[in-house]
Image (cartoon, rainbow, N blue to C red):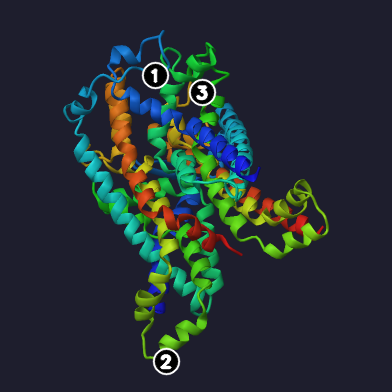
Amino acid sequence: MKKAASVLLTILLFALAFITIVPFLWMLISSFATNSDIVKITGSIFPTPTTLSNYSGIQQKFDFLRLFANSLFVATVKTVIIIYTSAVLGYVFSKMHFRGRNVLFGVVLSTMMIPWAVTIIPQYEMMVDFGWLDSYKSLIVPGLVSGFGVFLFKQSIGGISDELIEAAKLDGASDSRIFHRIILPISHNTIAALAIFTFLWNWEDYLWPFLMITDDKKQLLSVGLKMFNGQYGTDYGGLFAATSIAIIPVIIVYMIFQKQFIAGIASGSGK
Amino acid sequence: MRNIAVTALIVYFSIFMVYPIYKAFAGSLHEWNPLVGTYNWVGLDNFKSVLSDGLFWKSLWNTAYFSVFSIVFRIILGLGLALLLSSRLVKAKDSLRGLFYMPTITPLVAVSFVWMWMFDPQFGMINKVTGLDINWLNDSHWALPAIIIMTIWKDFGYATVLYLAGLMNLPRDVYEAAQIDGANSWQTFWRITLPLLKPTTLFIVITSLITYVQAYVQILVMTEGGPGTQTYTISYLIFDQAFQKYDFGTASAMSVILFAITGVLTILMFRASGDMEQS
């Protein structure tokens, strides 16, 4: 009885999951179809996959690989730095005492509540004044501290016992050594959760690169996709192919870190 | 290490957060066009013109409509799915989670494209499957609902993750006590699970609110505010005002109003949840 319920429920959930990802399957199948087959009004729901030309033609239509590499570079650099700064600040805020600690942490948290619309115009002007337009400095430097990341790490590092840290101190370990040798390795779940979110947020970021980067060669992929759509709006096959590839890196990052993902969120959001 | 980290944080925030916020407030009181270099004091004129602008109110209404529907469905779907996925009866949890998170972990620009094609009146899948004949994104009644549908699909997985994490942290003994008292599963859900998940719900509602009042990419990709101005939201309007019209002063006034609205709503929600706790 229980076994039957278990099988039934699992099948039901797989059916729901299938419906959830149908848009992706449809896109993927369409990316192997010819344009005339895609825009056909009558006929089956899924076009017939018959060609690889959408993929082989991407690079000629726009510098796809270059934009892909640009996005990969910026998103990776930012993810690594944000994880590090979040972990350091999470450690400082949860285990070290200093005057104004709670006020400062409150300020960090409150930055999560500030809409981009408020800061984007002054930041835009700042980047112009710094002469950072069209350089990756403008994409990387203003976004290196994440309120969300600090919050996650403060919660999870707060759960690490003080005795462990005291014991290491008695052995003569410095703060920096304790952080790198003890805190960081223990925090792998939080690192995983933050890596997934941060990589995604930077990979999908549109507005800031759109404003900062004017050289098409230096542009990031999400902006490139939108421009490609504007220019070649009727080349659906090409767009389907480009979009399918644009999704892959985030899925890979997710697959690498998925095992620790939920545990990371749980330790970060707990209590 | 502590002193370096704290000093660096303060310096960094002063440059990239405090100064921009100050400048947004100051800028809202100026006629400000960076293209020609104007920055002239106009007092509250920007606010007056914003508040008398019909498009501003329409965008505000669209933002509210978009946010409320997206948040409500995000919570319901996220919680429902988390409850199902946390059941001990379900097998292959990792694969299922992976599939259900797919929309959440794929870039918004990409999924906006996918749904733009899904909603295409000619070859799109939605009309083919449902047999409807709606020109979704070009129809003044359906464009915003279509964007909301896409957003709910894209985002429910985030609520699922947080609820799954919340369910993992629930105290076991309360459930055992309820079982001894003879509570059925429906009562257990309403009386125990839901109240205990309130902090998670509050967290999701607040972060969702912040996200949705800033929603921009799906609108830019799928409708560019159209048809006409039917899908203008407040963030789209601010972007348009600033970076298409180069009217930074008015755009700053709008962003200050948006800031105030989000701030007040967040405080009200914290208050309301605190009141519920006491009663």
Q: Earlier in the sequence, mark 2 or mark 1?
A: 1
Query: Helix, strand, or loop for circle 1?
Result: loop
- Image quadrant for the N terminus of chain A? top right
Q: CA distance from mark 2 to mark 1?
A: 66 Å
Q: Position of residue B190 (x, y in %)?
A: 76, 48
> Mark 1 falls within which chain?
A
> Mark 2 falls within which chain?
A
Question: Which residue is at the far left?
Answer: A60
Q: Is B250 in front, or is B192? A: B192
Above-or-below relation of B28 to A181? above
Q: Is B102 in front, or is B258? A: B102
Tell me the mark number nearer the camera, choosing from 2 and 1.
Answer: 1
Q: Position of residue B25 (x, y in %)?
A: 51, 50
Q: Which mark is residue A46?
A: 1
- Image quadrant for the C terminus of chain A? bottom right
Q: CA distance from mark 3 to mark 1?
A: 33 Å
**Amino acid type of disc 1?**
Phe
Q: Which residue is mark 2?
A: A170
- Badges 3 and 1: C-beta atoms under 8 Å apart? no
